[in-house]
């Protein structure tokens, strides 16, 4: 019986690694874009008194050099959202650490809720899912 050999294994492995790098970068780019869209939407609808809450709404991501997210002119030092854990640039968080932010978002017994983060997230949820699905379906040229 003739011996049979499988050829091209190293090339196939190299191509799979290239594919992984290309797809991972595309996902990172899309997640970042979507997170900043959510941040802008939240800032556009949040109620404003002094401007501190709006200025403190920020985006941060795993692997970022910032411990807290970027802050605006009205934000105090230390405002902004903490960097999440996770694979580098694959975990994004949009939010604020201003102590009264949850009271505005969810309301209190004396104040009606004025949601800004949840509506901003949900306004882009479908778009984000569709974009990520498209990335995974796209063909990739490895040559």
Image (cartoon, rainbow, N blue to C red):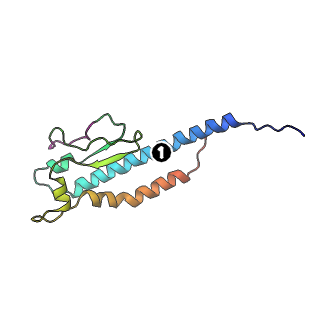
Q: Judge from the rendering whether residue 23 lies leftward or rightward of residue 79; answer left or right.
A: right
Q: Is residue 65 visible?
A: yes
Q: Does the magenta segment cover residue 85?
A: no
Q: Split into 4 quadrants, where in the image is the C terminus? A: top right
Does residue 65 lie above or below 72 as drawn?
Answer: above
How many neighbours does mark 1 have within 10 angstroms: few (below 14), some (14-19), or many (20 or more)? some
Q: x, y (%) of residue 89? A: 40, 41
Picture residue at 17% right of the left edge, 48% below the top: 98
Which residue is painted at 17% across and 50% down in the image?
53
Q: Please tell me whether residue 69 belongs to the stretch shown in magenta.
A: yes
Q: Nearer the viewer, residue 75 or 90?
A: 90
The rendered magenta stretch, by its main secondary structure, is classed as loop
Q: Please identify the quarter of the rendering in which residue 90 is found.
A: top left
Q: Which residue is mark 1?
A: 26
Q: Report the number of discs.
A: 1
Q: Which residues are magenta?
A: 67-75
């Amino acid at each position: 019986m003739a011996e049979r050999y499988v050829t091209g294994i190293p090339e196939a492995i190299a191509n799979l690694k290239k594919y992984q790098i290309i797809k991972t970068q595309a996902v990172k780019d899309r997640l970042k874009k979507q997170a900043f869209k959510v941040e802008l939407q939240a800032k556009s609808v949040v109620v404003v008194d002094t401007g501190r809450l709006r200025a403190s709404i920020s985006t941060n991501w795993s692997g970022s050099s910032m411990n807290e997210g970027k802050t605006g002119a009205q934000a105090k030092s230390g405002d902004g959202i903490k960097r999440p854990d996770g694979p580098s640039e694959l975990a994004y968080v949009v939010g604020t650490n201003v102590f009264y932010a949850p009271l505005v978002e969810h309301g209190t017994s004396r104040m009606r809720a004025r949601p800004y983060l949840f509506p901003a997230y949900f306004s882009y949820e479908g778009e984000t899912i569709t974009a990520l699905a498209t990335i995974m379906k796209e063909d990739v040229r490895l040559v």
